[in-house]
Amino acid sequence: MGTLSLRFVQIGFGLVLLGLLGCQLQDPPGFGRQGDLVRFSGRLWDVKSGPGLLGPGPNYFSNRSSDVYIDGKGYLHLRIQEHDGRWYSTEVV
């Protein structure tokens, strides 16, 4: 291999390394809340909510982050809470 060819290989290798250093590998979070979606137990769940009564029940369903959340240990919490004089259930589907 000539000196010029070796130099091109070195430059190419350096450019590849620079490209790799610029990349950030990020795994998707294992659990957590993202808008009206909850990542829990390896699945993505919809937080049930709507403008009126929904089944089963019928009930009012809350999508408030204080009522449906994943704690620091990865446990899913679904709370029944009163908001503005009305009781709300929680559900993920």
Image (cartoon, grey):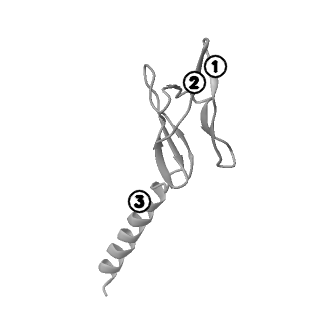
* The N terminus: image quadrant: bottom left
For disc 1, the neighbor class at 10 Å (few under 14, some 14 to 19, many from 20) is few
Q: Which residue is located at x 44 percent, y 65 percent? A: 17
Reading the image, the residue beneath label 3 is: 19
Marks 2 and 3, the one that precedes in the sequence: 3
Q: Nearer the viewer, residue 70 or 47?
A: 47
Where is 45 relative to 43, above or below?
above
Q: Residue furthest right?
A: 73
Q: Label 1's element?
A: strand
Q: Label 2's element?
A: strand
Three-letter amino acid code at the position of disc 1: Glu
Reading the image, the residue beneath label 1 is: 82
Q: Residue furthest bottom?
A: 1
Where is 54 relative to 6, above or below?
above
Marks 2 and 1, the one that precedes in the sequence: 1
Q: CA distance from mark 2 to mark 3?
A: 51 Å
Three-letter amino acid code at the position of disc 2: Tyr
Q: CA distance from mark 1 to mark 3?
A: 53 Å
